[in-house]
Image (cartoon, helix red, strand yellow):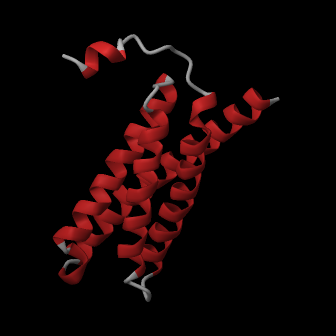
Amino acid sequence: MMMESTLTALEICRQACSDCYKICIETLNYCKNRGGKYIDITMVSMMRDCAEMCMLCINTIDDGSEFMGRICELCAEMCDRTAMICEEFDNDAKMLECAAICRQCAQHCHQMGLQSASYFRRASLIDKEKLLYS
């Protein structure tokens, strides 16, 4: 039962990351077309980074990476920050849509980060002693 709920949570997280990736790319294009305050370098960079992190999160989920939980946590942080930037455009439906989807992704990624220990499918091939004393 635990494995089934974890797999369901993984699929939900993966879909949230996919949705977030798509809306960030869409919103980036929207901002480029709007110009002016919409092409602030900090905001544009954050959206691009968020999209890239979502894709990395999807890939680590698909691969069953032992780093998935930590990557999901970082993805959650980036999604929250992107949402905060987008929410500053409180009269723009597209920006608020991006913020909402980023917040949703952050919630699922944070949850996956907490649950990830039960998902690891491969043992570490690295001897931690060698890492520490190399």
Q: Quadrant of residue 125?
A: top left
Compared with residue 29, is residue 70 higher up or lower down, i.e. above or below? Answer: above
Determine whether, in the image, residue 114 is placed left or right of residue 95.
right
Compared with residue 91, is residue 46 higher up or lower down, i.e. above or below? Answer: above
Q: Residue at x 43, y 15 (%)?
A: 124
Q: Residue at x 39, y 41 (%)?
A: 55
Q: Measuring from the top left, give residue 47's x and y in whole percent.
A: 31, 61
Q: Quadrant of residue 43?
A: bottom left
Q: Measuring from the top left, give residue 41's x and y in whole percent.
A: 17, 69
Q: Residue most toward the bottom?
A: 91
Count of labels shown? Answer: 0
Q: Residue most toward the right?
A: 1
Q: Residue at x 21, y 69 (%)?
A: 42
Q: Residue at x 82, y 29 (%)?
A: 1
Q: Quadrant of residue 91?
A: bottom left
Q: Measuring from the top left, give residue 30's x and y in whole percent.
A: 32, 69
**Along the line of sight, which residue is nearer the eye, 45 or 24?**
45
Determine whether, in the image, residue 73 is placed left or right of residue 27.
right
Compared with residue 60, is residue 42 higher up or lower down, i.e. above or below? Answer: below
Q: Measuring from the top left, give residue 11's x and y in whole percent.
A: 63, 37
**Quadrant the C terminus occupies:** top left
